[in-house]
Every structure is written in C-alpha cells, then in structure tokens.
Amino acid sequence: MIVILTGAGVSQESGMAVFRGAGGMWENERIEDVATPDGFARDPKRVLDFYNGLRRRLMSGKSKPNPAHEALARLERESKRPVLVITQNVDDLHERAGTRNLLHMHGELLKARCTACGEAMRWEKDMLLEDCCPECAKKGSLRPDIVWFEEMPLHLEAIEQALAACRVFVSIGTSGNVYPAAGFARHARQSGAHVVELNLEPSLGASVFHEGRYGRAGELVPAWVEEVLSGTSW
C-alpha cells in the first residue's frame, strides 16, 4: 500500500489560504475565538460567520485542483498497489480531482455536524444559529464538521492500520509541527516503509525521511507519480 499525507502546501497552490502566517485564515482572528470548543460556546455566531466565509470562498469556484491533486488522483487510478490519501486539509480539492480513497483527518468545510445527534451531513450554504439538523430536527445544534484545537482528529484507527501496513509513505506540503500527523512518517518507517518528503522546504521532521525533494508541489508530485507508475521510484 502507498499512503500519502497531504497538508496546506498542496491546497495553497490552488489559492486556498494556509492557516498560519501572512494571508493565513487566522491572520485577523484569534485561534481561541474561532477554532476551539470554548470559542464556539462563547460566541457561536462569530464562529459560524468565520467558517461561512471560508465555505463561500471554496464554493466560489476560484480554487481549483492543481497538478498535485490531479497527479495523486491519477496514481490512485493507475497504481497496481492500493493508494490511500490522508489529508489535513478541509477543502474538497482532492475529491474534485478524482481521488476516492481519502480520509479527512481534520474534518471537512463542506459538512455540518449535529451536536445533539452526532450526525454529519453535506452542507454547502451558510450555517445559521437557527438552522435545524436534517437528521434529528434539533434547532441550533449544528456546527462546522471541523476538528478544532483540543479535539481528536478523525479516522485515527484506520490511519494507524494503514501506516502499519504501507510499504511507501509520502508526506506532501506539511510543516511537520502538528501532531499526530507529524509522527506518521516515523511510525511508517518503523513499520518498514520507505518514507519520502515532498515539500517546499525541509519540514521539522525532515531527518526521519529516507528521501526529500523540495520545491512546488505542483511540480514535484506529478514527477514523483510518473516515476512510481513507470517503476523507476524506490
């Protein structure tokens, strides 16, 4: 199995803002206010408005899959080995490119989750305080289906199994400073996988990787996929 972890560096080339730094999603907001359970409890309207803005930007069509997304979808279609993409990104650009075997470990911007019944559902419009859950009809119970700080990432059991079984692990566009994702490469390597980093620059965990290639994801990923499919990689 080939397991691929993608981070903000992949979506940034499609015009999606990264979370931190200049121009980031939180440049004008405190993380504590818009990305924690306590922030939502204090001011749910502010939190909903923040994610409504991000959702509108994603739905506007200005952000489209780039060559990195498209190359990973091609790898899934043409590889003789099973391919799993684990993404830290909350956009749907992997899906738009055609990737199907995909785990969103930090949730999805185009989904809502009901705090009353626990159901998650597709949600493409603005989320309002007075909205009712389509499943249980509870009013005012919806929140973005996003993993906030202090919350556990999703699909950890499936990810653990994939890391233990994979023969190749590739980290693309990640900083290497957010756990548990920052520990995936070490876990895969200890399980016997060949681990590769494709990134704009070496991450904090660059020493863990057998191989590192540095530059734009839109250039590195298609080249790496071509090597894999032609049998010239690792």
Image (tube, grey):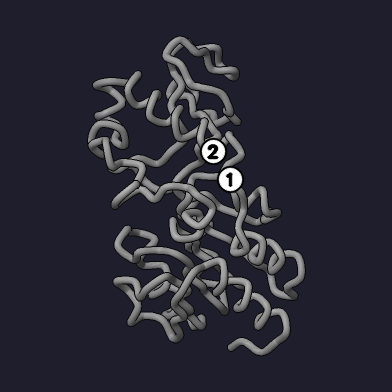
Mark 2: give few (<14), some (14-19) or many (20+) Cα within 10 Å: many
Amino acid type, residue under disc 2 in the picture: Leu
Give the residue type at disc 1. Asp
The residue that appears at 48% across and 50% down in the rendered structure is: 89
**Percent from the top left, x then y, of residue 49?**
39, 24
Please, what secondary structure does the residue beneath circle 1 have? loop
Residue at x-position 61% and y-position 39%:
61
Lateral position of residue 199 relative to residue 71, left or right: left
In the image, residue 85 above or below residue 142: below
Which residue is depicted at the point 50% across and 59% down?
10
Residue sitting at x 27%, y 37%: 28
Mark 2, residue position: 58
- Residue 40 in the image: above or below residue 75: above
Q: Nearer the viewer, residue 149 or 230?
A: 230
Q: Residues within 10 Å of mark 1 (few under 14, many from 20)?
A: some
Residue 187 visible to an observer of this rendering = yes
Quarter that holds the N terminus: bottom right
Specify whether residue 191 is in view. no
Task: Measure the alpha-carbon separation of dots 2 and 1.
Answer: 8 Å
Residue 76 position within the rendered picture, expressed as x and y whole percent measured from the top left: 70, 65
Asked whether the residues under the numbered discs 2 and 1 touch, taking CB atoms below 8 Å apart as contact, a structural biologist would say yes
Give the percent coordinates (x, y) of residue 87: 50, 55
User: The C terminus appears in which quarter of the rendering?
Assistant: bottom right
Residue tagged by mark 1? 92
Image quarter of residue 229: bottom right
Of badges 2 and 1, nearer the viewer stands: 2
Q: Please tell me which residue lies in front, 22 or 173.
A: 22
